[in-house]
Every structure is written in C-alpha cells, then in structure tokens.
Amino acid sequence: MTDRPASTTKNADEGGTDYLETIPYRVVAVYLPLGVFLFVLLFPFYWMTIATFKSNTELLTTEGFAALWIVKFTFENVERLLFQTEYPRWLVNTLFVTFTATFLSLFCAVFAAYAIEKLRYSGARLVGLAIFLAYLVPPSILFIPLATIIFKFGLFDTPFALILTYPTFLIPFCTWLLMGYFRSIPYELEECALVDGATRFQILRKIILPLAVPGLISAGIFAFTLSWNEYLYALVFISSSEVKTAPVGVVTELIEGDVYRWGSLMAGALFGSIPVAFLYSFFVQHYVSSMTGAVKE
Amino acid sequence: MASVVARNVVKAFGSTEVLHGIDVEIPDKAFVVLVGPSGCGKSTLLRMIAGLEKVTAGEISIGGQVVNNVPPKQRNIAMVFQNYALYPHMKVFENMAFSLRLAKASDEIVQEKVHAAADALNLREYLDRYPRQLSGGQRQRVAIGRAMVRDPQVFLFDEPLSNLDAKLRVQMRTELKELHQRIGGTSIYVTHDQIEALTMGDRIVVMRDGYVEQVGSPLEVYDYPNNIFVASFIGSPAMNLFAGTVTAKDGLSIVLADDGTVLPLAQGHGVSDGRRVVYGIRPEYLALSKEGQGFETEVVVVEPTGADILVIGRTAGQELRASFHDRHDFRPGQRIWLNPRLDTVHLFDQETTRRLELDEADSDLPRFRAV
Ligand SMILES: Nc1ncnc2c1ncn2[C@@H]1O[C@H](COP(=O)(O)OP(=O)(O)O)[C@@H](O)[C@H]1O
Ligand SMILES: [Mg+2]
C-alpha cells in the first residue's frame, strides 16, 4: 500500500473550501434556509395572483372552493380595474412622476456626491452628514411643512406636488449611494485627467460618470422603486382621481366604505409591480456584470 | 522643453511641514531623479511641480515662468503615475488620445501622434484593447505613451516602475532611458530605488525627511557622498560605516574603532588626532589580504549572487559587508583579513554627519575633496 492520498480528480473540483461540506450539511445550511426565504418572499405574489383571477364568491368563502388555488378562473376583477376605474391613467401618472423625480434626483445627487467626495473643500464631510440627516427625517413628519409649501406654490393636486417632494428623500439616498461609488474611483485618474488638460466638468462627464455607471444604475433603480411605491405624499398632496398615482388610486377608489374589492385591488397591485420587477430583472444582470473589474485596474 | 526651478519650496499639510525649503534646479532636457526613502516628500514635490498640490511657500518656475498659481492644465506637463492611472473604460487608443481630444486636435493629428507614440513603444497591436486586457509592462508603456503624445514642457514620473516585476523593471529602465535619449525632454523621475536613480539619472537629487541632502551626477553621489545618510542610502550592498577616533599608532594615522579594531587610513589626510569620525568603506573596495593587513572579520553568511560573492561578516562588533568579484571558498565561522583600498575610504564627522572636507584635510587625496 502507498501512503499517498487518493486522487480527487474524478469529481469536478469547484475550488475553495466546498470540499469540507457534505451534502446533508449543504441541505441544512444552504438550501433549507434559502427555500424558506424564497417562500416567504414569493408567497404574497402568489396570493396576489390567484386573488386577481378568483371570482368574488370564491374569494370570500372556501366552501366548495380551495384557498390555495383557483377553481373558477375569471377576468371580471381585471375588467373592473381596467375599465371601471382610471387605473391606466394612474399607471401613466405614476410612470411620469417616477421617471421625472428619479431623473431630477439622480442629476442633483451626481453633483452633490461628486462635490462632497472629490472636491477637497473644508466641510465636505459635514455637508455629507447633513444630507444624510435630512434623509433621517421621517416623511410622516416632513409632509406637514411640505404641504404648506405645496399650497403656497399652488402645486396642490398637480404631478409637480410629487415630482418636487420626492427628491426630499431621493436626493439624500442617491447622494449617499453615489458617494460610495465615487470614493472607489482612484484619485489618480482625476489627477491624470487634470494634468491631461480636462476641466472639472469634463472629468465628471468623461471619467467619473462612465466609471460610476453601476452606481448610477443602482441608485436609479432604488430611486425608481421608492417613488413608484410612495404612498403618503401621493395620498396627501393629490385629490383628483385623474392625477392620482397607482398605489393611492387603487386603495382610494377600490375600497368603497367598508366594501373591499379584493380581486381588483390585487389586480392593481399585481400590474403595479410588473414594471418594477421588469426593471430589476433587466438591470441586475447589467449592473452585476459591470461591477466586476471596472474600476480597480 | 523647459527648465524647472524650485526655490526655497516649503509644503505643509495643515500644521505638518513635509518639505522644508527645497532648492533644486533642473536644466532643460535633463533627466533628473528624485530619490529618497518612502515618505521623504518626493511625490509631494513632484505633485507641486505638476500643480496638483499648492505651494505653501517659495517658488516653482517652469521655463522661467513662476507657476505657483497656474493650474495643471496650463502648465503643459505630462505625468506618469505609479499605478498607471489608465482610464479603465477607454481603449488604449482613446487613453493615449485623451489629452489631444481635450485640446481639440484634429482627427488626423490625433491619429498621427497616437500611432507615432504607439510605434515608439511597440504598442501598435494593442491600441484596440482595454487596459485590463494588458500586462503590467504594456500598461506602463501606455501610460508613457499617453505622456509622449503631448509634447509637454516637462515629463514627470512618479515611481512608474515600482509595480513591475524585477526583470521587467530592469528592461523598462533601459527603454525609458533610451526613449529619453531619443526624444529628449526635461524629465523628473521619482523613485525610492537607489539603483534606478543611479542607472537612469543624468543628475540625482537625494532627499530625506523633506530636505535635499545632495545633488549631483550618479557617480559623484556614489563616490563623494555629502554625509552619512547619502553614503548609506546610495549603493547596494550598502557602505560599511564604523564609528571611531582618529589616532596615531606606530607613527601611522589610523581610525581606532570603538571596540579597538584598527582601521587603516591613507596618510596625510590632515584630520587631527582625537577627532570622532565615522569611517566608511564600500563593500567592493575591501580586498582579501594576508593576516595582519587591514582588519579581521568573521564570516557569518556567504551570499553568492553569481557575478559577485557577498560576504556578511562581523567586525568591530557590527555587521560588515564585503563583495568579491573573484571566486573564493568562504565558510561561515572562517576568519579572514580584509584590506580597504585606502583612496576609497570616506571619513564623516560624527557630530554633523557631514563628510570631512578638503579644507580640513590638507592632503592631495582625491577622496577628501570638496563637494
Ligand atoms: N495629502 C496629504 N495630507 C497629509 N500628509 C500628507 C499628504 N500627502 C503626503 N503627506 C505626507 O507627506 C510626507 C511625504 O509624502 P510623499 O511625498 O508621498 O513621500 P514619498 O513620495 O517620498 O514617499 C509623508 O510623511 C506623508 O505622510
Ligand atoms: Mg511617493
């Protein structure tokens, strides 16, 4: 007999310390928690989906029906949502408000983050901190003074009431996210560009922004989601149905007194989450791939 | 092309002063190396010349014009950074063309200049690649190419070779020097590596802790170090230094090391007896000799490098380095006698650490000449 260890080349080696983990161990430590997690996350979506396509009777009783799947498939909820409310209009409003607010916030945040992170002026840290503190003021307090301002400017019940108030939480958020990205871009690149004859603005446009694309994308996605789902300001600053955003419109118009139109509510929620889900799935791929090996050269 | 002059330049970061009145003159078309240990302020000085740091006090002029308040963009300098600072999102061509494009050069000029630089640096086939697809040496060449396309007044290099492996470093050293000989152009080159400094510079500026310790040609600095710091910093293996006292013994003037070892001196040096000195001798000027000639050392470690054999021994209670070009069979523990070449012995004052100068030593020995 030899003392050599047995050859391990028969099984594909995935590297790292994976070899220490037995299959039962992996099931307990990886797949089981992952499964529970996925279930908790996805079940509401499932519930939403089946509720959308159940008839009212099926929704309200389990007698003769099942709770967890659809027995009698129907489009009546969807139909009510699309043709008896202004839901399509609300979606368009939400899209408009969300896109404008996100763009505006990103635009401001890029300059704010660049100034704080890359122009070495005294007090930069302090300004960064102040912006962060602004983010910590809860909207449920902020909406009171904001409401006064909105009224004074005559913006009440217009999309601008939202477009101009969403940045109060979007700008701090995006600024902080972008500061982190800008920080990871080496100073030397900028100094080199300075020596090469670039102005600050050219550096921002030709060096920093192209390198911060992953950061811009993630800031954009988060800002988009935050304003897409925003409820409080949209509820307070808007009253006419044709200006409402989807989250508010669905809740205010499909709950009539104590009658909850569950099917249509769920349909509204389901269709409302599609754009966000689409955005995530489209960009996640993109930003993960651009994060690897972009800046650290 | 232009000369660069620093006059009494001071730099302070907050309340910490890191450069204390630097005076350096860099003639037009010269290749000058700033060398010194890490943290001595070389990069800071270079960055002030580039305009990336404010001058706290004093004056920097490029081509006769004071540039203290001129932004980097208008100084017409090119800089090569330690980690290349290539723009990762641009292909090699665009990296090299960046400054030309900013200057709104026409497309033909951009093409012509970038291709000329790429040819000079053997980068032609890499123009279409991203920096991450290049090896370290190629990236370094791109960084240099980016500087070359500019026709700047001054080239600045901040430790451009320190991220390369040893072999490539030696090769790039030669290439850079050859490039300078071909293109000319005032160049200021920062390194902490004294070999790089000796091999590349027309002139060397040795710095320590924010002061200039010596300026001179490589051989001047090597052969006539101004003080103990320069003597020990320049040269590898480093110069042997022994503290002792100048003493008369048997009618001969010698240096008596603190433990009683007798270190021979050339006669007629004029340094008075009783003076506390540091005796310096480079490893290559120690010759193997017969018993009783020179001084004795005990071999501790033998390091053959191929070209030379380096012996690390123990003399006067301290480490001694001697290198031999001829093959010898040394064994650890062996006791050997070493005889210093007397005209290469350096004496430094123990108090001031400065080299003992000719005005104190009335001999005609070249080694003790004024600096
Ligand atoms: N931005 C800065 N702020 C404060 N101290 C600095 C800064 N840059 C450099 N220093 C200090 O200045 C000294 C010289 O630094 P540097 O010029 O980088 O040295 P070298 O290039 O010779 O290694 C160091 O002690 C360093 O800590
Ligand atoms: Mg440095």
Image (tube, coloured by chain):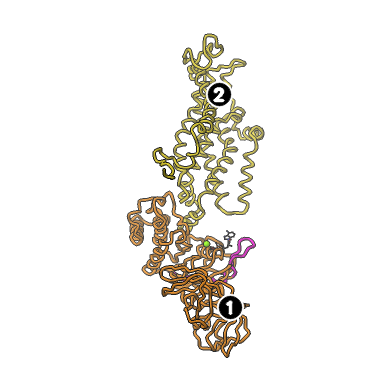
Chain A, hue in figure: yellow
Asked whether residue A243 appears in the rendered view, the answer is: no
Callout 2, which amino acid?
Gly
C-alpha gap between disc 1 and disc 2: 90 Å
| Residue B164 against residue A50 in the figure, above or below | below
Give the residue displayed 42% in from the left and 74% down from the top. B325
- Residue B89 located left or right of residue B295: left
Question: What is the secondary structure assignment of the residue under circle 2?
Answer: helix
Asked whether residue B170 appears in the rendered view, the answer is: yes
Q: Which mark is residue B161?
A: none
| Farthest top residue in view | A64
Structural crowding at the residue carrying mark 2, measured as other residues with C-alpha within 10 Å and reported as few (<14), some (14–19) or many (≥20): many
Percent from the top left, x then y, of residue B75? 48, 63
Q: Which corner quadrant of the image does residue B8 belong to?
A: bottom right
Please state the chain letter of the residue tagged with numbered disc 2 in the rendered image: A
What segment is highlighted magenta in the picture? B1-20
| Farthest front residue in view | A1
Whether B109 is among the magenta residues is no
Q: Is the magenta region chiefly helix, strand or loop?
A: strand
Percent from the top left, x then y, of residue A27? 51, 31
Whether B13 is among the magenta residues is yes
Q: Which residue is mark 2?
A: A249
Question: What is the secondary structure assignment of the residue under circle 1?
Answer: strand
- Residue A90 located left or right of residue B111: right
Give the residue displayed 61% in from the left and 35% down from the top. A153
Q: Which residue is mark 1?
A: B278
